[in-house]
């Protein structure tokens, strides 16, 4: 029996051919629409607490990185390129219809200078960036890998020393984790490696009751003793 005498099969074949043609047209049409310049990224919205990352800097990176339009742009490549910008700790890039890239930045917040080069952020991570206020940051010297420990110690130091009007300008942690501070007027405070918080409390008592009147005349205060401390004048 010839196919021409089978209307049902002919209808099925015609439907299949129609579906194939439709898919081909949609495919070509979709490719054309997706590549159409009218869908280019038209706006960039910067979010987050941004102090050091400039919009001009972001725009240059995006112009250099984006290939294609709003639909075809590789958001992962954009995110990676922006992540390499100084001061960027973390970045999220999202598309927002109809033609916007929404970019959320988390910046590094510096709390110290690292003696071997770079800055230390609040997470105990070392990063490199130009910073106008670098001279106001304390200088930390410690074995690599001790950064998070120093951040934790920093909060304890601030809690104990700020009420005394003292500010840490330097912090040295030896390979054996013995701690030395440099505070106001370059006075060194030796805390050692054990019972650091108890020794800080002892220092706070001594500063309030004995040392504060002639603190600037001292070279160091050594608290590495069980029941007292030693001072040396300049």
Image: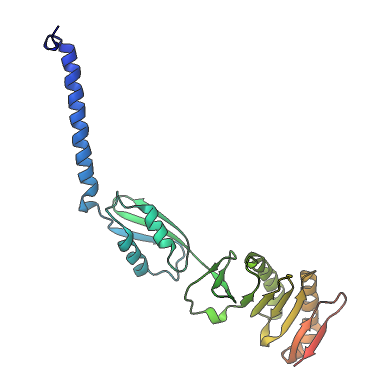
Name which residue lies at 34% across and 69% down: 56
Q: Residue furthest right?
A: 227
Q: Considering only vertical position in the picture, is 147 above or below 172?
A: above
79 and 169: which is toward the camera: 79
Q: Residue furthest left?
A: 4
Q: Which of the image's four quarters has the C terminus?
A: bottom right
Number of numbered markers: 0
Q: Is residue 144 left or right of residue 189?
A: left
Q: Considering only vertical position in the picture, is 153 above or below 79?
A: below
Q: Which of the image's four quarters has the N terminus?
A: top left
Residue 48 falls in image quadrant: bottom left
Name which residue lies at 22% across and 32% down: 23
Indicate the position of residue 96 as horizontal and vertical percent values.
Answer: 34, 51
Residue 8 falls in image quadrant: top left
Indicate the position of residue 159 as horizontal and vertical percent values.
Answer: 69, 71
Indicate the position of residue 100 as horizontal and vertical percent values.
Answer: 32, 55
Residue 16 falls in image quadrant: top left
Name which residue lies at 18% across and 25% down: 17
Q: Considering only vertical position in the picture, is 73 above or below 26?
A: below
Q: Residue furthest top?
A: 1
In this view of the protein, can residue 47 be seen by the observer? no
Q: Is residue 169 left or right of residue 230?
A: left
Q: Is residue 16 left or right of residue 109?
A: left
Name which residue lies at 68% across and 76% down: 172
In this view of the protein, can residue 186 be seen by the observer? yes
């Amino acid at each position: 029996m010839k196919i021409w005498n089978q209307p049902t099969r002919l209808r099925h074949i015609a439907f299949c051919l129609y579906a194939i043609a439709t898919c081909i047209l949609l495919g070509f049409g979709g490719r054309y629409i997706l590549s159409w310049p009218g869908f280019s990224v038209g706006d960039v919205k910067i979010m987050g607490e941004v102090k050091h990352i400039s919009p001009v800097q972001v725009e240059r990176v995006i112009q250099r990185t984006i290939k294609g339009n709003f639909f075809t742009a590789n958001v992962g490549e954009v995110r990676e390129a922006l992540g390499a910008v100084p001061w960027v700790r973390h970045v999220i890039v999202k598309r927002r219809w109809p033609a916007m890239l929404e970019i959320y930045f988390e910046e590094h917040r510096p709390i110290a200078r690292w003696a071997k080069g770079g800055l230390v952020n609040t997470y105990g991570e070392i990063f490199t960036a130009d910073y106008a206020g670098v001279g106001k940051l304390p200088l930390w010297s410690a074995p690599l890998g001790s950064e998070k420990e120093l951040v934790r110690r920093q909060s304890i130091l601030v809690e104990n020393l700020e009420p005394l009007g003292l500010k840490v300008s330097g912090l040295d942690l030896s390979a054996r984790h013995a701690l030395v501070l440099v505070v106001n007027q370059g006075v060194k405070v030796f805390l050692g490696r054990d019972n650091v918080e108890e020794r800080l409390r002892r220092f706070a008592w001594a500063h309030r009751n004995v040392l504060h009147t002639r603190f600037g005349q001292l070279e160091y205060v050594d608290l590495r003793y069980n029941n007292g401390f030693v001072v040396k004048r300049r």
